Image (tube, rainbow, N blue to C red):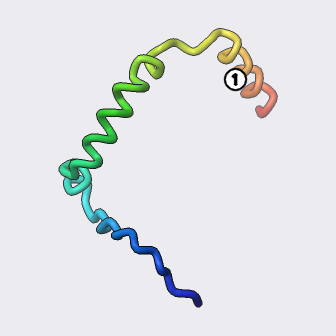
Amino acid sequence: MTSRKDSRPRRPSKSSETTQRDDPFELWLKRGLHDLFDEVASEPLPEELLRLIEEDRKTRG
């Protein structure tokens, strides 16, 4: 087995949700993603896509 020679520091593993919520990087990332995608995620699905999903459901039983 080869050893890892990566000089990047490893992030400590998160054992609880509270720790993740308080991590500054996690907060920054979550806020940035919300800023970028909240508006898009709140848009309604196009009728054509809804029709395709419904057709697929019918064919799968």
Q: Please tell me in which quadrant of the rendered image residue 27 appears.
A: top left
Residue 29 image offset from top left, x and y in percent = 33, 41
Q: Is residue 49 left or right of residue 29?
A: right
Front position in the image: 44 or 23 = 23
Disc 1 packing (10 Å; few <14; some 14–19; many ≥20): few
- List x then y, in percent, for residue 4: 49, 81
Q: Is residue 22 left or right of residue 39?
A: left
Q: Residue furthest top?
A: 47
Which one is nearer the viewer's eye here, 42 or 7?
Answer: 7
Q: Is residue 8 above or below residue 50?
A: below
Q: Residue furthest right?
A: 59
Q: Residue at x 76, y 27 (%)?
A: 56
Image quadrant assignment for residue 48: top right
Q: With 9 as the anchor, is 1 left or right in this view?
A: right
> Residue at the location (57% across, 87% down)?
2
Quarter containing the N terminus: bottom right
Residue 20 horizontal/vertical position (percent):
26, 53
Q: Quadrant of the C terminus?
A: top right
Q: Secondary structure at mark 1?
A: helix
Q: Amino acid at mark 1?
A: Ile
Residue 34, percent from left and from top = 35, 29
**Against 10, is 55 above or below?**
above
Residue found 25% across the figure and 60% down from its top: 16
Residue under numbered circle 1 = 53
